Image: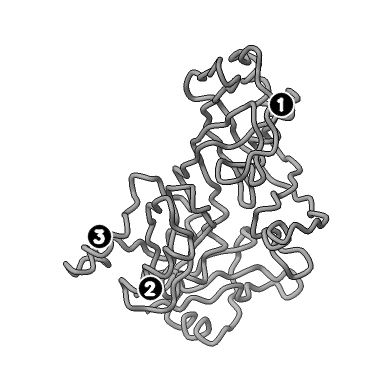
Amino acid sequence: MDGIIPINKERGMTSHDVVAKVRGILRTKKVGHSGTLDPSVDGVLPVCVGRATKVVDYLMRFGKTYQGSITLGLATTTEDLDGEVVERQPLSKPLTDAQIGAALKQMTGELTQIPPMYSAVKVNGRKLYEYARAEETVERPKRKIQVYQFKQIRPTEFDEEKGEQTIYFEVQCGKGTYVRTLAVDFGRQFGLPAVMSDLTRTSSGGFELKECVTLAELEQARDEDRVESDVLHPIDHALAKFEAIEITDSEWQLVQNGGFLKRALTEPVVAVKYKGKIQALYQYDESRQVYRPEKMLLVR
């Protein structure tokens, strides 16, 4: 079985938990996910099965969309509500929609982000959350991220008694973006502590939430022998952004052995199709003026 299953991950599970469940349901070991979701976050988690595990990186190039909320007036160790509160600074009055909109707009485009201590980013071979749990400090690497859109999607709520304001947002971003950190950086623009107080991933890998199945629905589809017909998406989905070329029988013999292709094309990378299925990605080699293998799939 080869393909992609967009799972609607429920809260309380890690992404690894989902992969383990899918392995059990489908009785196969070759399963991986595209883009980790924290246990407290639900939504779209594309899961790759069989040969589709080779295209995980290409799925991540589609970008992601999230909906959630930022709460101003407090900060935590984890930048979300799972951590311990380390600061409180009650607001005397709420931010206006104009202030919020301007601040969100400032946070679009290419940004530099420092990942949170409670994250799986590795420094010197150890994950940052391992340093955090050991109460050790380490310099975190800065990284470039892309935020395509960041906007308010409904009226804010202001708790006058607590001095906390909750802002509801939607963000479209590229891979490697920590939305928790976006929430903290938003508050920083006003000199206020902030946390990400809720988050759902609504799209990832080119899949929308409405296209996803729960683990229970996947199990039912397996029992009714309709996983491949109703749930599994072809590997081609992950490679839809590449120009596809159909090859001849003789070229197929070359491709199966990792041979080069001579084609007069302009694209730097092309998807090579044989009998309607993408079998490989080929990259142009300017020095030899041929296309050479970049990623072999060889789907039956």
Residue 69: which numbered mark, if any?
A: none
Give the amino acid type for the residue marked by disc 3 in the picture: Asp
Total numbered circles:
3
Q: Earlier in the sequence, mark 1 or mark 3?
A: 1
Q: CA distance from mark 1 to mark 3?
A: 48 Å
Q: Give the residue at mark 3.
A: 230
For label 2, the SS is helix
Left or right of 25, for residue 47: right
Residue 192: which numbered mark, if any?
A: 1
Question: Looking at the rendering, in which quadrant would you find the C terminus?
Answer: bottom left
Residue placed most toward the observer, 51 or 288? 51
Question: Looking at the rendering, in which quadrant would you find the N terminus?
Answer: bottom left
Point out residue 221 in the picture as x, y percentages from the top left corner: 22, 63
Give the amino acid type for the residue marked by disc 1 in the picture: Leu
Closest to the camera, between mark 3 and mark 2, is 2
For residue 233, above or below residue 160: below
Q: Earlier in the sequence, mark 2 or mark 1?
A: 2
Q: Quadrant of residue 288?
A: bottom right
Pointer 3 local density, CA inside 10 Å: few below 14, some 14–19, many at least 20: few
Q: CA distance from mark 2 to mark 1?
A: 44 Å
Q: Give the residue at mark 2.
A: 23
For residue 181, above or below residue 212: above
Give the amino acid type for the residue marked by disc 2 in the picture: Arg
Q: CA distance from mark 3 to mark 2?
A: 18 Å
Left or right of 230, for residue 86: right
Q: Earlier in the sequence, mark 3 or mark 2?
A: 2
Closest to the camera, between mark 1 and mark 3, is 1
Point out residue 244 in the picture as x, y percentages from the top left corner: 48, 62
Point out residue 249 in the picture as x, y percentages from the top left corner: 42, 81
For residue 244, above or below residue 145: below
Residue placed most toward the observer, 50 or 202? 202
For label 3, the SS is helix
